[in-house]
């Protein structure tokens, strides 16, 4: 992991197979996606570990124990979305299993977006699909200059159902619509322009030093004031309610089971264009 001056790891609060929850000084916790061999892509076990860690953080009482969450990925890629084995399993899963999986993924995003303290996300390499969802659920995104962002579900005959409320909440309909409807990739400069990222590292900037500076800015706020302001923001711009969460889970589960979704996943694995591409 990138060394952050002034913020060494004090201890690993919750080790997992695919994620680590680390305690840094001054009430900073770091959630690390730790599957660099598959570009930190999700599978069901990783989703469960992330959601569990976020559940633990949500229960930390107000005070110095938790003031900021830093979200990072090991290796060269922040998060590439769903991994290949996981996607293959989804393609042949029963409707009930597909829906259960979608609900679990939806809970993970909701837990991140509703965390009562600021969430700082560092994106290197790429944030694709669910990785873009993690970024959209964060409060502040620092992007490396070479980072790319995309939600490619529509190109697979699927729908970006679970992340769409958070992408629209963050970007507004005007900027979210082309991103979600085309599956196009955007670079860091474009992500900054549309509000998906708040800062892009310059060519001579150090990621560690920049993260240290950003953490210092968040820690300058009173702990109670920061929590109350985060609560205020969640009231002003509400997260999806239970009915919308269920609707988005149903949407992705139905798309996975559809003939178009099956064809899109087949084409993806066979590295050919799906039938609907001219």
Image: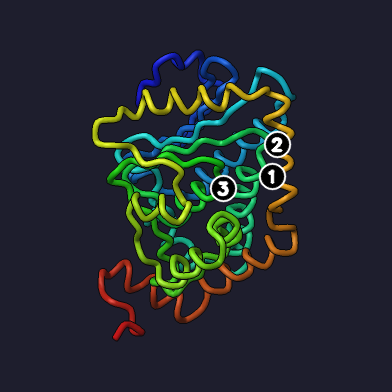
In this rendering, is residue 127 above or below 6?
below
In this rendering, is residue 216 above or below 177?
above
The C terminus: image quadrant: bottom left
> What percent of the width, then of the height, locates residue 93?
52, 65
Q: Which residue is mark 1?
A: 233
- Mark 3 or mark 2, which is nearer the start of the sequence? 3
* Nearer to the camera, 1 or 52: 1
Secondary element at tag 2? helix
In this rendering, is residue 153 above or below 263?
above
Real-space CA distance between mark 2 and mark 3, rounded to the nearest whole angstrom: 16 Å
> What percent of the width, then of the height, locates residue 234?
70, 46
Say which of marks 2 and 3 sits in front: 2
Real-space CA distance between mark 2 and mark 1, rounded to the nearest whole angstrom: 6 Å
Q: Pointers 2 and 3 in contact (CB under 8 A)?
A: no
Q: Which residue is mark 2?
A: 229
Residue displayed at 58% across by 73% down:
254
* Nearer to the camera, 231 or 258: 231
- Mark 3 or mark 1, which is nearer the start of the sequence? 3
The quadrant where residue 40 appears: top left
Q: Is residue 258 left or right of residue 206?
A: right
Residue displayed at 47% across by 28% down:
214
Q: Pointers 1 and 3 in contact (CB under 8 A)?
A: no
Residue displayed at 44% across by 23% down:
212
Q: Pointers 2 and 1 in contact (CB under 8 A)?
A: yes
Real-space CA distance between mark 1 and mark 3, rounded to the nearest whole angstrom: 13 Å
> What percent of the width, then of the height, locates residue 88?
41, 62
Q: Which residue is mark 3?
A: 137
Secondary element at tag 3? helix
């Amino acid at each position: 992991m990138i060394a952050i001056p002034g913020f060494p790891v004090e201890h690993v609060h919750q080790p997992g197979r695919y994620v680590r929850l680390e305690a840094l000084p001054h009430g900073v916790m770091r959630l690390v996606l730790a599957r660099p061999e598959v570009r930190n892509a999700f599978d069901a076990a990783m989703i469960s570990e992330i959601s569990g860690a976020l559940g633990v953080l949500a229960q930390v009482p107000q005070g110095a124990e938790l003031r900021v969450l830093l979200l990072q990925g090991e290796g060269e890629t922040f998060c590439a979305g769903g991994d290949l084995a996981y996607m293959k399993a989804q393609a042949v899963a029963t409707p009930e299993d597909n829906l259960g999986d979608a609900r679990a993924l939806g809970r993970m995003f909701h837990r991140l977006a509703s965390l009562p303290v600021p969430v700082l996300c560092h994106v290197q390499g790429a944030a694709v699909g669910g990785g873009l969802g993690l970024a959209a659920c964060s409060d502040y995104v620092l992007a490396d200059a070479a980072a790319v962002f995309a939600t490619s579900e529509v190109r697979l005959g699927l729908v970006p159902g679970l992340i769409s409320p958070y992408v629209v909440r963050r970007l507004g309909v005007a900027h979210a619509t082309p991103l979600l409807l085309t599956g196009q990739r955007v670079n860091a400069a474009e992500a900054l322009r549309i509000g998906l990222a708040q800062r892009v590292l310059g060519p001579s900037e150090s990621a560690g030093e920049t993260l240290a500076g950003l953490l210092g800015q968040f820690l300058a706020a009173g702990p109670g004031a920061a929590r109350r302001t985060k609560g205020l923001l969640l009231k002003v711009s509400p997260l999806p309610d239970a009915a919308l969460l269920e609707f988005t889970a149903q949407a992705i589960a139905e798309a996975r089971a559809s003939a178009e979704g099956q064809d899109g996943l087949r084409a993806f694995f066979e590295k050919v264009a799906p039938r609907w591409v001219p």
